Image: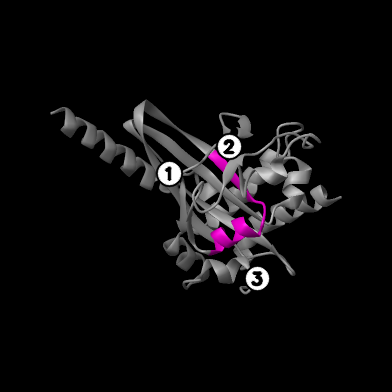
Amino acid sequence: MRKSFVLLLLVCFLTSILSAEDDLPSSRRGTTKSAGRVAAAGKVLAEIQGAPDQRIPEEVLGSAECVAVVPSLLNGGFVFGGRYGKGVASCRTKQGWSAPAFFTIGGGSFGLQIGGQASDLVMLIMNKGGMDSLLSSKFKLGADASAAAGPIGRHAAADTDWKLRAQVLTYSRSRGLFAGLELGGAVIKQDISSTREFYGKTVPFSNSLTGEVEPPKGSYPFLSTLAKWAQQAAK
């Protein structure tokens, strides 16, 4: 009886996770789910970087090779824990920031836990090794690419070792609080259905993130925001 109850709760949790994007308000969905995700990613980044002292340090953002944003990462469970979200990423190219690549992120855990919450997630890919993992279209944080909680503030302290700590720096914003996040074990892979919806065809990560694909008009709510803050960080 207890096993059946736990399985029922797991089914309910996973169902709510998979339908979460449908529940976003129209302002965050846009004309399509994929376009809404691009717009929401730009809004999340603008709000985080617009905060006076609780933001990604300029030196860190200015050094990032790629930036990935998940507008709503869901965490929760009952005994079994899980997290799931859908995001969008862009990398630096000779022409500027690349066309967006769509991905999912998920993972699970087991332990004494109950409840759930949604948070915004930002991941910065800091070097070629991390970028190579991202271009593979599927990788696991902590295994295929080292990950660590990123520093926060207008500027990174001179004595911090963020340049040496990890290939991917991660951040989370939940209930108005912004902080570095430990996210080891999460699996990131290409979101094929959203890619097809946005581009009208399947576009591999390596094509979009290396600048081989021209960014569609719907890309700019995210790319323009990313370019703005990256340019400020470079000054």
Q: CA distance from mark 2 to mark 3?
A: 28 Å
Is residue 104 found left or right of 14 in the rendered image?
right
Query: For residue 182, what is the image quadrant?
Result: top right
Residue 94 spot, x, y in % from top left: 74, 69
Task: Kindly identify the amino acid type of the residue bearing the numbered disc 2.
Answer: Ser
Location of mark 1 (residue): 23
Residue at 57% over, 72% down: 207
Q: Residues within 10 Å of mark 1 (few under 14, many from 20)?
A: few
Type of the residue with mark 1: Asp
Magenta region includes residue 128: yes
- Find residue 222 and report its horizontal and vertical position in percent: 64, 55
Query: What secondary structure is marked by label 1?
Result: helix
Q: Residue at x 65, y 70 (%)?
A: 211
Q: Which residues are magenta?
A: 120-135
Q: Is residue 80 visible?
A: yes
The quarter of the rendered structure image containing the N terminus is top left
Of labels 2 and 3, earlier in sequence is 2
Mark 3, Cα crowd under 10 Å, few <14 / some 14-19 / many 20+, is many
Magenta stretch containing residue 131, yes or no? yes
* Of residues 130 and 80, the one drawn nearer to the viewer in this rendering: 130
Q: Nearer the viewer, mark 1 or mark 2?
A: 2
User: Which label sits on residue 172?
Assistant: 2
> Mark 3 and mark 2 in contact (Cβ < 8 Å)?
no
Identify residue for label 3.
211
Viewer-side residue, 116 vs 136:
136
- Residue at the spot x=57%, y=36% of the render? 181
